[in-house]
Image (cartoon, rainbow, N blue to C red):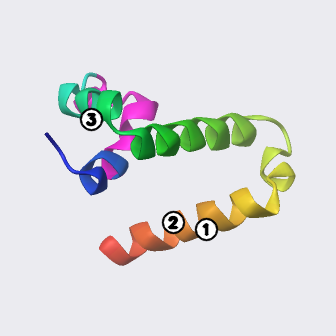
């Protein structure tokens, strides 16, 4: 089974349904067992939903904005 780090790294591609991630049995298995990563998936879905709305980015609660900024900084550090 994949690690939480691997699962979180795959979440956005999975949500975007990119061809290489449209069916990810390892990720789906991990999400079926890991409450933490299920929370990350739900967070990602909520952020995407907010960003789809006109002006959605300005409606993000401060806590959500801080968490998203931290997540993005973490991704930049991995490149």
Rate crowding at label 2 as few (under 14), some (14 to 19) or many (20 or more) other CA atoms within 10 Å.
few
Is disc 3 placed on a helix, strand or loop?
Answer: helix
C-alpha span from label 2 to label 3: 22 Å
Mark 1: few/some/many CA within 10 Å (<14, 14-19, 20+): few
Quarter the N terminus occupies: top left
- Taking the spot 80% from the left edge, 63% from the top edge, the residue there is 62
Regarding mark 2 in the picture, which secondary structure is present there? helix
**Closest to the observer, 73 or 41:** 41
Q: Circle 1 sits on which residue?
A: 69
User: x, y percentage for residue 69?
Assistant: 61, 68
Check whether the beta carbons of the residues at disc 2 and disc 1 lie within 8 A of each other: yes
What residue is pinned by disc 3?
30
Give the extent of the magenta segment: 9-22
Dot 2 corresponds to which residue? 72
Residue 14 to residue 62: above or below: above
Q: Badge 3: how crowded within 10 Å, few (<14), some, or many (20+)?
A: some
Q: CA distance from mark 2 to mark 1?
A: 5 Å
CA–CA distance in space, label 3 to label 1 = 25 Å
Q: Quadrant of residue 37?
A: top left
The picture places residue 26, in percent across and down from the top left corner, at 19, 32
Give the mark nearest the N terminus, 3 or 1: 3
**For discs 3 and 1, the disc positioned in front in the rendered view:** 3
Quarter of the image for the C terminus: give it.
Answer: bottom left
Residue 12 shows in this picture: no
Q: Residue at x 68, y 34 (%)?
A: 49
Residue 67 in the image: above or below residue 52: below
Provide the secondary structure element on which disc 1 rests.
Answer: helix
Determine if residue 30 is in view. Answer: yes
């Amino acid at each position: 089974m994949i690690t939480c780090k691997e699962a979180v790294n795959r979440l956005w591609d999975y949500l975007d349904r990119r061809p290489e991630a449209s069916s990810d049995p390892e990720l789906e298995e991990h999400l079926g067992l890991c409450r933490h990563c299920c929370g990350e998936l739900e967070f990602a879905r909520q952020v995407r939903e907010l960003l789809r709305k006109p002006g959605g980015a300005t409606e993000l609660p401060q806590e959500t904005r801080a968490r998203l900024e931290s997540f993005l900084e973490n991704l930049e550090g991995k490149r």
